[in-house]
Amino acid sequence: MKGKITISGVGCCLVDLLYTDIDFKSEIIKPYLSKTRGDGGLTPGHLVFREEFEKYSSIPFDQVLSRLTNGRAYTKINIGGPSIVSLINAAQLIEGQDCEVRFYGRGGNDEPGRYLISSIQETPVLLKNYKLIDAETPSTAVLSDPSYDNGHGERIFINSIGAAWKLGDQELDDDFFNSDIVVFGGTALVPQIHDNLTVILRKAKSKGCITIVNTVFDFRNEKANPEKRWPLGESDESYRYIDLLITDQEEAFRLSGEKDPQTAISFFIEKKVSSLIITNGSKNISTYSDGQFFYLSDLNEMPVSQKVIDEKENFLDGDTTGCGDNFVGGVIASVVTQLHDGVKHPDIKEACCWGVVSGGFTCFYLGGTYFEGKAGEKRAKMLPYYDEYRKQIAD
């Protein structure tokens, strides 16, 4: 692909309030843990709406948070959300290439909303039709337990959708659909976009866009129908308009209605998703391509970065918040680089190499968004991990 490549993204963008060193196995947190799916309780790795958690606990969330943190303030405030975090990482990794990365969204006309605008302006992502409206800025309290899962770490997310309720497909202008690549990230936390995703994806494909969808835990549909699979747009027709679907294993199970990885993958293939990446925390990722976007690749597995695992054992200052979102950004950046190199069908394995090291590198700082001191800084720091990972999978 010659010339400038334009990426436009829409989806979840919010303020993350990070609380580190929360023990998910402590006696203090036990009364607030979920007992049945969708009941509004807390579950490691899952997201719950603040309003539903308050119904479940019968206590204001701020009081529960004070108990869990022993009254201490959040460790860090940061840009969060599967859409904006992945786009920021992609834009940082392709800095210097002929590419423009844009984000569409809504925030509240409040202090967190102004924080988001000023912070995003410190990154290479351009805000496009991003407005502050009379509503609360979307936010997530992120509880992090670095010792969970044998030291790999995990998080619990308590989310307030706020102003994101007001963002609909009518806000996606002609420039959005004239982009080379459109990315829909964590739309389950932007309900109007999510519920109309079939129509939006169909229009994007009719305009010749490359379409990428990365998912987030869909508590709204989990709460409404805990025994049914989650919808993605108005119908399953959405899947045939997706060039690349990136999801984690739990989300893949809930979207497909299956409980086994192989049958879940078969579901997406049967629904005509062109290519698929399923992450699974610290375990292997699964990839597949039918040859229409990425070149043909049967179902394959790739490991996480051993260099990251080895170094993380003695590293205490980071957490796993944003690992999945940065994984997506690494994949997008690799796709852009390969297209700029004139490749007709990118290599999904190469894209996942940058995804794996992007997700792994996130463990070495707090929060999903890395703020660079100068352009190209993040890529330069990640290159040794990329080189070592290529050797790892070659061996």
Image: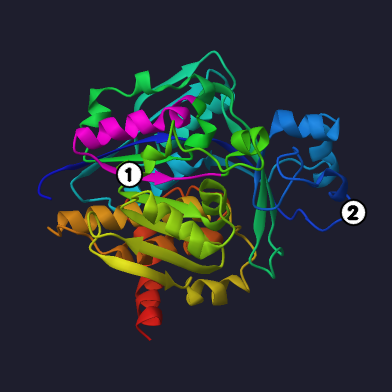
Residue 121, image x and y in percent? Answer: 39, 34
Disc 1 to disc 2, C-alpha distance: 46 Å
Q: Secondary structure at mark 2?
A: loop
Is 185 part of what is drawn in magenta? no
Up the image or down, 1 lies above or below 73; here it is below
Q: Residue at x 87, y 45 (%)?
A: 31
Residue drawn 79% across the image and 39% down it: 65
Rendered location of residue 192, percent (x, y): 47, 24
Residue visible at 35% across and 60% down? 379
Quarter of the image where one finds residue 70: top right
Marker disc for residue 27? 2
Image location (x, y in percent) of residue 302: 43, 72
Residue 318 locus on image (x, y percent): 60, 59
Residue 36 as seen in the image, left or right of residue 286 = right
From the viewer's perspective, is 46 left or right of 63?
left
The magenta segment is: 192-216
Q: How is the image coloured?
A: rainbow
Residue 374 shows up from this direction: no
Q: Quadrant of residue 48?
A: top right
Query: Can you say which quadrant of the picture contains the C terminus?
Result: bottom left
Name the residue carrying label 1: 240
Q: Residue furthest left?
A: 2
The residue at the point 53 percent across, 44 percent down is: 216
Callout in the foreground (1, 2) = 1
Give whichever of 241, 311 is nearer the camera: 241
